[in-house]
Image: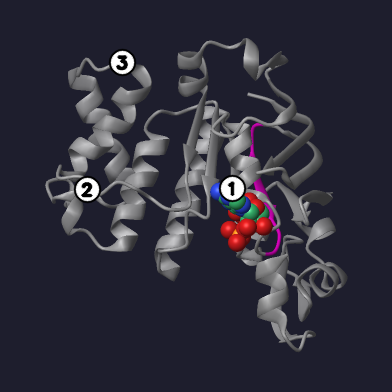
């Protein structure tokens, strides 16, 4: 599904956060990068309709407002930064809920096997009968991801899906996301802090800063030493590997009080 955003404006309590954001996402992985408080999460929440923004969100040529609510729920799956899945139920039941909540509440045999397949794809089938409230943060995060991808939505929005995962799980998860995106012709949009993951897995990178999109294009065109210095205030070495994928090695911060400036925006 093609997702187009035109002149999106949004503010919390009239404090402007998104300032005329326009972008297009096609079926592939798009990474949204940018410093803390740039507006990445807010943009994702506007894209799925959780936050009501000014401007247009166009899904396959039709304004999101013209779709029925259940059509939007089926078409767009959103995985928030903080997972709230901690209810007393098994991992298999929680995964099944991800499917049912988008398709009605009748359980069919194929829904159960789809849930098990999804857990296997993510390498967490051993957790199927474990209780959700007994899982580690990373395990819970993997279940939230299972709940999102089981629906095979046209548009998959993920906010920092790797932030509780160890290095191996991060790569495995992105391998799965890439496969699912390609197999299902999905438009996958991921907000990410890890520039190396964005460079390795995204076909398109969108850079946000101060509520605006300041660059968009291939990883090599967006993730450059000059950009990292200017937007993140960090000196970094960026080299291109054999496939032309940028690899970022941060060296030092150019700011004296960097944390305060970055967090307060
Ligand atoms: N619920 C809220 N109420 C008021 N202001 C908010 C709310 N959520 C976010 N903001 C503000 O909106 C701005 C953008 O926040 P947002 O979470 O979209 O940024 P982000 O790029 O996702 O940041 P991070 O990388 O730190 O998660 C920030 O200044 C933040 O303080």
Q: Nearer the viewer, mark 1 or mark 3?
A: 3
Q: Residues within 10 Å of mark 1 (few under 14, many from 20)?
A: many
Residue pictured at 20% horizontal, 28% vertical: 112
Which label belongs to residue 125? 2
Q: Nearer the viewer, mark 3 or mark 2?
A: 3
* Residue found farthest to the front: 13
Q: Disc 3 on helix, strand or loop?
A: loop
Q: Nearer the viewer, mark 2 or mark 1?
A: 1
Question: Measured along the vertical axis of the image, is residue 122 above or below residue 139?
Answer: above
Residue pictured at 48% horizontal, 52% vertical: 81
Q: CA distance from mark 2 to mark 1?
A: 24 Å
In the rendered structure, are the residues bearing label 1 and label 3 in contact, judged by CB atoms less than 8 Å apart? no
Residue located beneath label 1 in the image: 190
Q: Quadrant of the C terminus?
A: bottom right
In the rendered structure, are the residues bearing label 3 and label 2 in contact, judged by CB atoms less than 8 Å apart? no
Residue located beneath label 3 in the image: 104
Question: How far from the left and from the top, in percent, is residue 255?
Answer: 78, 84
Residue 82 painted magenta: no
């Amino acid at each position: 599904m093609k997702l187009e955003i035109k002149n999106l404006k949004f503010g919390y309590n009239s404090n402007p956060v998104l300032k005329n954001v326009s972008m297009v996402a096609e079926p592939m992985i798009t990474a949204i990068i940018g410093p803390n408080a740039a507006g990445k999460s807010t943009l994702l929440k506007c894209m799925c309709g959780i936050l009501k923004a000014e401007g247009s969100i166009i899904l396959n040529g039709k304004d999101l407002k013209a779709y029925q609510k259940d059509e939007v729920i089926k078409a767009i799956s959103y995985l928030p930064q903080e997972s709230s899945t901690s209810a007393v139920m098994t991992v298999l039941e929680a995964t099944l809920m991800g499917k049912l909540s988008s398709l009605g509440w009748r359980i069919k045999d194929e829904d159960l096997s789809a849930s098990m397949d999804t857990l296997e794809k993510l390498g967490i089938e051993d957790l199927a009968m474990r209780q959700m409230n007994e899982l580690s943060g990373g395990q819970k995060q993997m279940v939230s991801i299972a709940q999102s991808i089981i629906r095979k939505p046209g548009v998959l929005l993920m906010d920092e899906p790797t932030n509780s995962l160890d290095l191996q799980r991060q790569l495995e998860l992105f391998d799965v996301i890439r496969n699912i995106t390609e197999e299902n012709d999905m438009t996958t949009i991921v907000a990410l802090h890890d520039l190396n993951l964005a460079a390795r897995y995204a076909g398109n990178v969108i850079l946000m800063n101060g509520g605006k999109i300041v660059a968009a294009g291939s990883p090599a065109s967006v993730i450059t030493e000059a950009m990292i210095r200017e937007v993140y205030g960090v000196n970094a070495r960026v080299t291109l590997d054999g496939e032309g994928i940028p690899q970022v090695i941060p060296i030092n911060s150019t700011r004296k009080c960097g944390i305060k400036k970055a967090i307060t925006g």
